[in-house]
Amino acid sequence: MTDLAALFAQLSREPDLDAPELQAHDATDRLLLETAARLLDAGGVDPSPSSPRIRAGELVTIGDRHGALTLGAAALLGARGIRVHQDPLLGERALAANAERLGLTGAFAHHALDASLLSGAKLVLLQLPRALAELDELAQAIARWADPQVVVLAGGRVKHMTHSMNAVLGRSFAEVAAGLAERKSRVLTARVPRSSNELSEPRFPIWGGDPELPFALAAFGATFGGADLDHGSRLLLATLRADPPAFPGEGRVLRAPERIVDLGCGNGSLAVAAAGLFPGAEIVATDQSRAAVAATRLTAEAAGFAGRVEVVRADGAEAVPDGWAELILLNPPFHSGAAVHAGVAHRLIRQCARALAPGGELRLVYNSHLGYRPLVERTIGPARELARTKSYTVVGAARR
Ligand SMILES: C[S@@+](CC[C@H](N)C(=O)[O-])C[C@H]1O[C@@H](n2cnc3c(N)ncnc32)[C@H](O)[C@@H]1O
């Protein structure tokens, strides 16, 4: 039997944020894999005694963080043709890098959350997402497209799990059972997908909005903030109206910015608001999350700005050429997965220095207690505080 501890020890989070306190695997990965192995040993997903434990293409992983689940399934269960869905691009890249190191690159392929991921799937290993909306979307997709015999093993850290997760799975599966907690993780097993008559219409994308926005916001289950306007972004938008950015164009004459980046665009609220506020501007909206770029595309299309808002799935500002941006709007994440970590925001702020044109402005909102201003001043240039509430601060800094 493959030694999972030895396999996990070889995994790295790179190129996702790496820090000594953050790991590339957790006890849930191990519990999911051990539960799957027990299920297959007991004849679980295919009772025919002559068949291999699991045939190529029958296993799907969803929400694998950095490859522990997928590569663990390849090594421990002998699975091949594994179909993988990961929302963040850096998770996909970490899995690919780990696979390369372990010689398992041919064992899996990435897919969007659609029939190509799930049709004919017999076993789904799922790292439970934090948001119930995301779980709801995933469960509905599995029930809709997977094999009727599919077994879903959905695992999480006990401290992040709630009874509502069982209820959400129960909307799409007739049988949901909770396993015993082991090493502070637990696995929920879902079987018997509800029939297409019982499953309602796909519940995603959802649409929302805000009285301050003259357009609707779209969201998928994993889109940051859902279909609402984020409070920090609301404050940032207020400063764009009260204190509009001005770019030193030809002859250093100040004018409205014409090349704008929404860095980490989520549901597209900032990109599409900027398209309305700066009618002459070309906008690049970029995010590493599949659910964010899909939502931003819909938000921009519905607002009639699809032609002016280019939406790109990319890590940080990598899709923005050096010195291209005359304005960058940034409401950075303060999480790396479940861990609260300032490193992601620091990295994005540093990348803005490269992507901004000289004289171009970074307009940044952050939780007031995080105090990013010294970093902004070091990497971009002198910063002006444009708004401050108990919760959020907005600063503007022009690149030296
Ligand atoms: C706080 S949310 C802001 C979303 C949106 N701009 C808004 O205001 O509602 C941060 C966004 O950054 C994205 N993000 C996190 N790490 C990223 C990275 N390395 N590259 C690009 N986007 C990233 C997340 O997916 C998330 O959508």
Image: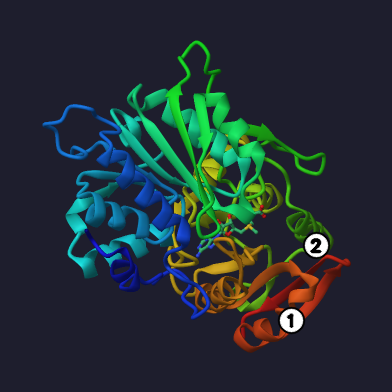
Location of residue 335 by image quarter: bottom right
Q: Looking at the picture, how far across and down is residue 347, in whole percent?
A: 54, 75
Ligand 1 location (quadrant): bottom right
**Quarter placement of the N terminus:** bottom left
- Give x and y (percent) for residue 95: 33, 61
**Rendering coords of residue 138 (x, y %):** 49, 36
Its colouring scheme is: rainbow
Q: Residue furthest right?
A: 390
Q: Amino acid at mark 2?
A: Thr
Instruction: Find residue 178 and report its horizontal and vertical position in percent.
Output: 53, 39
Q: Amino acid at mark 1?
A: Ala
Identity of the residue drawn at 23% across and 61% down: 2
Residue underneath mark 2: 239
User: Image quadrant for the C terminus?
Assistant: bottom right
Marks 2 and 1 sit apart, C-alpha to C-alpha, by: 14 Å
Residue 218 visible in rendering? no
Say what secondary structure mark 1 lies in: strand
* Residue at position x 60%, y 38% in the image: 165
Looking at the image, residue 36 lies above or below residue 301: below
Numbered mark located on residue 369 in the image: none
Q: Which residue is mark 1?
A: 383
Mark 2, Cα crowd under 10 Å, few <14 / some 14-19 / many 20+, is some
Q: Are marks 2 and 1 in contact (CB under 8 Å)?
A: no
Q: Which of these two is toward me, 185 or 113? A: 185
Judge the density around disc 1: few (<14), some (14-19), many (≥20) Cα neighbours within 10 Å.
Answer: many
Find numbered disc 2 in the image and state the secondary structure of the residue it sits on. helix
- Is 262 placed above or below 128 here? below
